[in-house]
Amino acid sequence: MDRRDRVHPGGDLRQLRLALSDTGDRITLGATLESNPAFALLLGPASNLGEAGGYTAWRTVVIAAAFLAVMSILTVVRHTRTDEESGRTELLAAGCVGRFAFLAAGIGTAAFVCLLTGLAIVIGLVASGAAPTGAIAYAAAVAAGGLVFAGVAAIAVQIGSFGRTAISLSVGALAIAYLLRAWGDASRTTG
């Protein structure tokens, strides 16, 4: 196999920088991606693709928010229904722990991790040269996704009798939210 035929998993960032070093090339790429409804369906509407921060945010905000939402769902369910199913809740409730302590622990842990993740995103993006306002907006969007689905999971553990039911309801709500966002973005792009 010839060396030129090899595919590098990380891509060659140097060649990408050379290919998009011209402003006209970046504008052409942006116009192509912004007018493509398939990209809008998967990743949301493309905007500000001429800058590295805008391109990074467009490519990763939906995926990062979804991962943080799943983490929040699993954390809240773990601290409520899963502990109840294992008998740990009754053991702790025999002491002086209030009845809402388990739900508060789950929501508090998920909120703390969401905010800590947002802070890490801001630090990482600003350190890599992104504008601070854009980094804060991006981190707020990702953290808000996690916080919203911590609340969805808190409602689901009250509805479902078992941990698996609560996880299924919460992840189902996440899937519906993603599909509604995808439908709205794709229909907005096509006119």
Image (tube, rainbow, N blue to C red):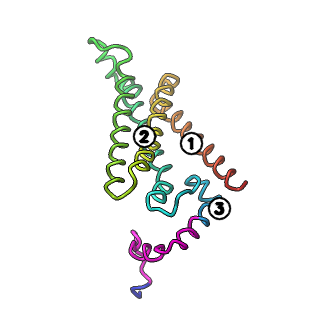
Q: Kindly identify which residue carries mark 2.
A: 143
The numbered dot on residue 35 is: 3
Q: Kindly identify which residue carries mark 1.
A: 175
Q: Is residue 187 magenta?
A: no
Amino acid carrying label 2: it is: Ala
Q: CA distance from mark 3 to mark 2?
A: 28 Å
Amino acid carrying label 1: it is: Ala
Which quarter shows the N terminus? bottom left
SS of the residue under disc 2: helix
Query: Which residue in the rendered view is the most extreme toward the bottom?
Result: 2
Q: Nearer the viewer, residue 63 or 23?
A: 23
Earlier sequence position, callout 1 versus callout 2: 2
Amino acid carrying label 3: it is: Ser
Label 2: few (<14), some (14–19) or many (≥20) C-alpha neighbours in 10 Å: many
| Residue at image point 50% right, 64% down | 50
The numbered dot on residue 167 is: none
Q: Which residues are magenta?
A: 5-30
Q: Is residue 96 above or below residue 163?
A: above
SS of the residue under disc 1: helix
